[in-house]
Image (cartoon, helix red, strand yellow):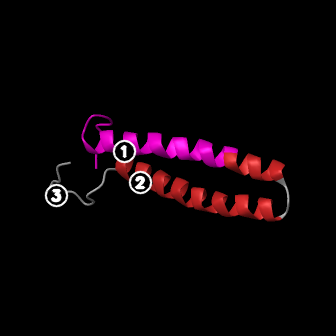
Amino acid sequence: MQENSTDRHPLSNLEYDWITLIQNKAQALMAYDQYILDAEKANSPECAAFFRKVHDTDKAQLAEARQHLLEVMQGKMGKGSR
């Protein structure tokens, strides 16, 4: 990523969006871990299974989002302005 000394912000809007999404997904994954524990403590395997399903979906989306961010930062995707 090249920075221009006239840039007001070192991240493009698209880079910032991906970073924010990744942060939110990472926080959600930590929350789901607690939800799974809570469901297990409440002896609710159905709820625990659902929380695991949501966790796995978000984990896969997080991996995909990381790849998109890398491509955006390498200039391979999204030529938006900063």
Q: Amino acid at mark 1?
A: Leu
Magenta span has 70? yes
Whether the residues at callouts 2 and 3 have beta carbons within 8 Å, the answer is no
Dot 2 or dot 3: first in sequence order is 3
- Coordinates of residue 65 in the picture (x, y in percent): 45, 43
Q: Please give the name of the residue rendered at 21% of the width and 57% of the height, measured from the top-left corner.
A: 7
Whether the residues at callouts 2 and 1 have beta carbons within 8 Å, the answer is yes
Q: How many marks?
A: 3
Front tag of 2 and 3: 2
Front tag of 3 and 1: 1
- Give the class, few, some or many, for how many residues have Cα within 10 Å of label 2's Cα (few <14, many ≥20): some
Q: CA distance from mark 3 to mark 1?
A: 23 Å
- Coordinates of residue 9 in the picture (x, y in percent): 28, 60
Dot 3 or dot 1: first in sequence order is 3
In the image, the segment drawn in magenta is: 53-82
Instruction: List the residue tagged with mark 3.
Output: 6
